[in-house]
Image (cartoon, rainbow, N blue to C red):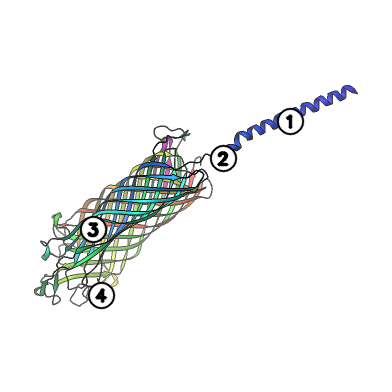
């Protein structure tokens, strides 16, 4: 009986020892894990930084009319692209989520736009106003707050002073004033800027940011050029020259940019580095693909400025202008494939219809013996048609991981637009003797415009995680080469050998896209986004109506922009 007690006692002690050892091992494992998750290493934003950015902007310049309220025009649209450098300093108190800083930036800008101005009467020879931008910059203060547990994601607002360097010209239209010089103003204008953005520290030294800013540069004085006035409508002999008057023009810009900053005095943390040169994180062994579908609701603007000859120095003197506004609905598929060492392929393809819109056809011919009109503006109240487009890009992620990254790409975009305008009514000089003085019904086709754009793209793509499952993706592309072929068809024109006028030329453009996506599951994602495209060319030649030789300069500008909804599915390891 004593031996049994001893045996049971030893057995109990052995069990207690094993249990104690197991509990100690669990406790030791928990001791190794808990402090890491409970006390993350906070990233501090204090210090100097330098960086670069790429973006797209949309500006407007409004010219006041000193003669009275205008029939049409006066506001110049200025889509453009820009790229440049920035630098600054941040300060963040220990343990505080608030970050204060100052930043300066400078950018080269490519923006160019035109519109009719000073058109207060159909008896007055109005002007062509052209604005161009070459450079801009700002000095701003920043106030931000970290919004992630590790302090690496910063939401901020900014404000300060800004400058824009460019020029504005006002040129009297019509062949009668081809030798009259433009009224020009070249200067650098100062104003103010407000903006907001997100910045994320991808590594110990590198951060990526996406921001929006609005800049206003106030008004500047400019002299309106002399013009002409038909004292008696439709009488070319009654044309008298008029003197110019002082006026002013305003300027503002909406700017979206994607930037990369290097924080001085810091090295990459453990397991951090540039993807293409020193990938420290595990890289996927195979390609992983995301495929989805979108619905895009868009608005488009197309503008032809018809100069009187092929002399580019005189292309601001216009004889005619066509301006289309249209609303489109389209569907598309999109894809992105990510592979080893950060390489990726992405793109989309889609098409749809133009369901509504209008068109304005402007002409200047004050001394035409067949029917002089100082200014004609016919309104075509219905526009329908089709659009189609496709984009392919290949690139590499330079920094980051699947949650936060920035990369560069090069690619190709094709855009096709087919528009038909219907109806016709004169709004500048309503009279039975004027063009469309007798209204044409909306059931009658008037003018068609077809164009194809082939463009090369170079740009930056970035992804920022705002919250678990919520990501912002920004894609900014500059089009260094855009080739357009166009066809203008005046269906009721009988005085020319042919109603068709083909045109061709090269130019540039910008394309910008931002998507806010949410992961419903690791594989299914839904999102909402916005897109802005602009292409332009001042080096355009047209063959004229039935003529086999290049006869006139025809600058062309096109924009399409809108919002879309999307859903996608990921294949491979999420």
Name the mark nearer the viewer: 2 or 4: 2
Question: SS of the residue at dot 2?
Answer: loop
Mark with earlier residue (3, 1): 1
Name the mark nearer the viewer: 2 or 3: 2
Crowding at mark 4 (Cα within 10 Å: few <14, some 14-19, many 20+) = some
Mark with earlier residue (4, 3): 3
Name the mark nearer the viewer: 4 or 1: 1
The residue that disc 1 covers is 19
Q: Which span of residues is magenta-colored? A: 334-347
Asked if residue 458 shows in the view, the reply is no
Up the image or down, 273 lies above or below 157; here it is above
Residue 173 lies in quadrant:
bottom left
For this view, does 395 lie left or right of residue 368? right
Mark with earlier residue (1, 2): 1
Question: SS of the residue at dot 3?
Answer: strand
- Residue in view at x 65 percent, y 32 percent: 28
For this view, does 17 lie left or right of residue 73? right
Whether residue 340 is in magenta: the answer is yes
Q: Residue furthest left?
A: 237
The residue that disc 2 covers is 39
The residue that disc 3 covers is 131
Kindly report the distance in space between the C-alpha atoms of the residues bearing marks 4 and 1: 98 Å
Q: Position of residue 429 (x, y in %)?
A: 21, 74
Q: Magenta residues: mostly which secondary structure?
A: strand
Residues 29 and 193: in front is 193
Mark with earlier residue (2, 4): 2
The residue that disc 4 covers is 439
Up the image or down, 33 lies above or below 561; here it is above
Q: Are marks 3 and 1 in contact (CB under 8 Å)?
A: no
């Amino acid at each position: 009986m004593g031996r049994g007690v001893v045996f049971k006692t030893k057995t109990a002690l052995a069990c207690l020892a094993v249990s104690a050892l197991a509990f100690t091992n669990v406790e030791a494992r928990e001791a190794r894990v808990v402090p890491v998750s409970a006390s993350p290493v906070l990233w501090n934003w204090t210090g100097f930084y330098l960086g670069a950015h790429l973006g797209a902007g949309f500006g407007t310049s409004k010219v006041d009319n000193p003669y009275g309220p205008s029939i049409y025009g006066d506001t110049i649209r200025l889509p453009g692209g820009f790229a440049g450098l920035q630098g600054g300093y941040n300060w963040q108190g220990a343990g505080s989520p608030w970050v204060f800083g100052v930043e300066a930036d400078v950018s080269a800008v490519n923006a160019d736009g035109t519109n009719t101005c000073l058109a207060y009467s159909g008896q007055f020879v109005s002007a062509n106003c052209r604005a161009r931008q070459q450079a801009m910059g700002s000095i701003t203060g920043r106030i931000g707050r970290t919004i992630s547990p590790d302090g690496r994601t910063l939401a901020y607002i900014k404000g300060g002073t800004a400058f824009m360097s460019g020029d504005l010209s006002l040129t009297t239209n019509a062949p009668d004033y081809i030798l009259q010089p433009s009224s020009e103003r070249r200067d650098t204008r100062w104003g103010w800027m407000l903006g907001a953005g997100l910045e994320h520290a991808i590594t110990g030294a590198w951060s990526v940011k996406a921001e929006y800013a609005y800049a206003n540069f106030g008004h500047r004085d400019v002299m309106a050029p002399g013009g002409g006035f038909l004292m008696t409508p439709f009488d070319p002999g009654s044309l008298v020259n008029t003197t110019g008057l002082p006026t002013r023009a305003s300027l503002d810009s909406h700017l979206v940019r994607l930037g990369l900053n290097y924080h001085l005095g810091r090295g990459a943390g453990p397991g951090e580095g540039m993807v293409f040169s020193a990938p420290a994180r595990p890289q996927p062994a195979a390609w992983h693909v995301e495929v989805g579908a979108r619905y895009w609701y868009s608005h488009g603007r197309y503008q032809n400025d018809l100069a009187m000859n092929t002399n580019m120095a005189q292309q601001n003197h216009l004889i005619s202008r066509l301006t289309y506004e249209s609303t489109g609905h389209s569907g598309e598929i999109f894809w992105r494939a990510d592979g080893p060492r950060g390489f990726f392929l992405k793109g989309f393809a889609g098409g749809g219809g133009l369901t509504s819109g209008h068109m304005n056809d402007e002409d200047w011919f004050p001394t035409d013996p067949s029917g002089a009109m100082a200014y004609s503006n016919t309104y075509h109240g219905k526009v329908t048609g089709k659009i189609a487009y496709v984009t392919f890009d290949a690139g590499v992620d330079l920094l980051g991981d699947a949650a936060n990254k920035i990369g560069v790409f090069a690619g190709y975009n094709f855009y096709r637009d087919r528009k038909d305008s219907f109806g016709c009514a004169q709004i500048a000089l309503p009279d039975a003797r004027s063009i469309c003085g007798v209204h044409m019904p909306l059931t009658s086709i008037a003018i068609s415009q077809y164009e194809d754009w082939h463009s090369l793209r170079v740009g930056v793509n970035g992804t920022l995680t705002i919250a678990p499952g919520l990501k912002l993706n920004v894609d900014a592309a500059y089009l260094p080469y855009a080739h357009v072929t166009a066809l203008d068809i005046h269906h009721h024109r009988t005085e020319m050998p042919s109603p068709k006028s083909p045109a061709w030329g090269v130019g540039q453009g910008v394309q910008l896209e931002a998507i806010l996506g949410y992961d419903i599951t690791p594989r299914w994602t839904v999102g909402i986004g916005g897109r802005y495209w602009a292409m332009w060319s001042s080096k355009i030649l047209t063959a004229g109506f039935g003529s086999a030789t290049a006869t006139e300069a025809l600058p062309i500008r096109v924009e399409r922009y809108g919002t879309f909804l999307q859903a996608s599915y990921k294949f491979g390891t999420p």
